[in-house]
């Protein structure tokens, strides 16, 4: 059996022999590698780099143990520096990994860099391919102790971990170009007294003292196409009316603490031939308004479970199409809550008696804000408190609101548990009677 076949058969001696041929430039390696390149499966390659003595080998030893605990076959390629005087190398990295030496699921190979700059040996890439062919699912490539300009490992690895000691250099050192730019993860060996004063992204300041810098060089302004996404026609209260009919009305019933809903058949409250909300029975009106193309499409229905006693709430965050969804005790406040979202160009609103009592502006695609997490969090807390002051009994009514426009099924029923009319201009879904599923009657 040739060497390549033995490597594919997970023979460690054959893999070691082939790695030696590769390092020595033996011509026999080329023919074997052709076979491996065709048949080896790619592994996830993690590069571990950093200055001498930062703890790279110790970290790799722990990472190997973690991956083995999950049953993965692991490879380690540890590159040690060659002496500029004798040409030899003390392959000391593997000394720290001796507990894995007898593990048949771990293949550890030490290599000398033979004076090559960049942190790796000349044959590192081919060596990784041999470990992949041997069956390694993840390969850790540990570089020699590097300086600022040795970044070759980033070209070989899927993820690069930069290991460095805390307090090594000032803020100017932290923003210098080189090895600090290639890291996907930064690991420190001592967290005592560790505090992040500034965060740099792509070499630019993005945050200071734990707060995002709005509009700063590290937080580029979103492109204009993401703004101005609230495109709705000028609404009239008549567009929110549901014509009354005989029989019971299908309603969406919330399930406390869940995102699923149930179908209920309810006797609607009617005024002047129109279905109206009935806060006393917790039957509120819900409207879904198309906001992307300024179409006249509006879906209407009745929902039970919000507990609002007055006013209306609305949101431009509504899965999956993110149209505007509003729930309220009367058409006037529903209309005003939607109009306020239009003025904010996206967001969450609470309206009572035609007045805005709380809001969160989300002008980026109607979904995001440029304010800090702390500011948005404070506004959201105030908004939820306002909704509770309006009688809402839900822990987070806006989270529930954001899922109500999805077409979902009542458990045990193939029909959508939805009381909404379809988003079609001038047409209403048959909301009365004949639901085809089991539901409570109110």
Image (cartoon, grey):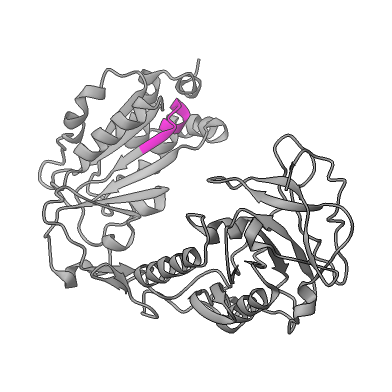
Quadrant in the picture for residue 376: bottom left
Q: Percent position (x, y) of residue 147?
A: 20, 58
Q: Residue at x 17, y 61 (%)?
A: 195
Residue 334 lies, in percent from the top left, at 65, 73
Report how many numbered discs are placed on residues in the image. Answer: 0
The residue shown at (13%, 48%) is: 84
Residue 290, placed above or below residue 58: below
Q: Position of residue 27 (x, y in %)?
A: 42, 33
Closest to the observer, 84 or 442: 442
At 32% from the left and 34% from the top, the residue drawn is: 76
Would you place residue 411 above or below residue 181 in this image?
Answer: above
Q: Residue 130 appears in which quarter of the rendering? A: top left
Foreground residue among 418 and 39: 418
Q: Is residue 313 left or right of residue 2?
A: right
Q: Where are the magenta residues, as a range?
A: 130-139
Q: Is residue 279 visible?
A: yes
Farthest-out residue, top: 1
Q: Determine if the magenta segment contains residue 105.
A: no
**Left or right relative to 36: residue 243:** right
Q: Residue at x 18, y 68 (%)?
A: 173
Can see residue 16? no
Task: Please tell me which residue lies in front, 233 or 283.
Answer: 283
Can you give x and y, in whole percent of width and height, for residue 327 in the image? Answer: 64, 65
């Amino acid at each position: 059996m040739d060497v390549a076949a033995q490597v594919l058969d997970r023979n460690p001696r054959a893999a070691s022999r082939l790695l030696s041929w590769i390092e020595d430039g033996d011509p026999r390696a080329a023919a074997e590698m052709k076979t491996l390149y065709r048949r080896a499966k790619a592994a996830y390659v993690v590069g571990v780099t950093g200055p001498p003595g930062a703890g790279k080998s110790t970290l790799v030893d722990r990472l190997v143990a973690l991956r083995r605990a999950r049953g993965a076959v692991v490879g380690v390629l540890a590159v040690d520096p060659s002496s500029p005087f004798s040409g030899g190398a003390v392959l000391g990295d593997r000394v720290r990994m001796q507990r894995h030496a007898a593990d048949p699921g771990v293949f550890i190979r030490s290599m000398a860099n033979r004076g090559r700059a960049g942190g790796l040996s000349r044959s590192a890439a081919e060596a990784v391919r041999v470990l992949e062919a041997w069956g390694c699912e993840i390969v850790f490539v540990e570089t020699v102790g590097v300086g600022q300009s040795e970044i070759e490992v980033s070209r070989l690895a899927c993820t690069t971990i930069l290991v460095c000691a805390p307090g090594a250099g000032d803020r100017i050192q932290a923003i210098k170009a080189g090895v600090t730019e290639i890291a996907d993860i930064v690991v420190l060996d001592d967290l005592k007294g560790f505090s992040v004063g500034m965060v740099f992204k792509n070499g630019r300041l993005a945050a200071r003292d734990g707060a995002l810098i709005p509009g700063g060089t590290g937080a580029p302004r979103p492109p204009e196409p993401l703004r101005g996404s609230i495109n709705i026609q000028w609404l009239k209260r008549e567009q929110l009316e549901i014509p009354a009919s005989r029989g019971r009305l299908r309603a969406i019933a919330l399930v406390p603490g869940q995102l699923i809903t149930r179908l209920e058949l309810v006797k609607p409250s009617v005024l002047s031939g129109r279905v109206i909300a009935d806060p006393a029975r917790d039957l509120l009106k819900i409207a879904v308004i198309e906001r992307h193309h300024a179409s006249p499409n509006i879906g209407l229905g009745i929902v039970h479970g919000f507990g609002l006693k007055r006013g209306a709430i609305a949101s431009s965050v509504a899965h999956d199409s993110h149209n505007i969804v509003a729930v309220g005790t009367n058409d006037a406040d529903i209309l005003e809550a939607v109009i306020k979202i239009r003025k904010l160009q996206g967001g969450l609103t609470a309206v009572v008696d035609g007045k805005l009592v709380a809001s969160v502006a989300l002008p980026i695609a109607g979904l995001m804000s440029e304010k800090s997490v702390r500011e948005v969090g404070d506004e959201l807390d105030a908004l939820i408190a306002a909704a509770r002051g309006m009688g809402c009994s839900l822990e987070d009514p806006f989270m529930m609101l954001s899922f109500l426009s999805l077409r979902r099924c009542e458990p045990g029923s193939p029909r959508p548990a939805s009381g909404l009319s379809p988003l079609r201009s001038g047409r209403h879904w048959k909301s009365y009677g004949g639901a085809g599923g089991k539901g409570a009657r109110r």
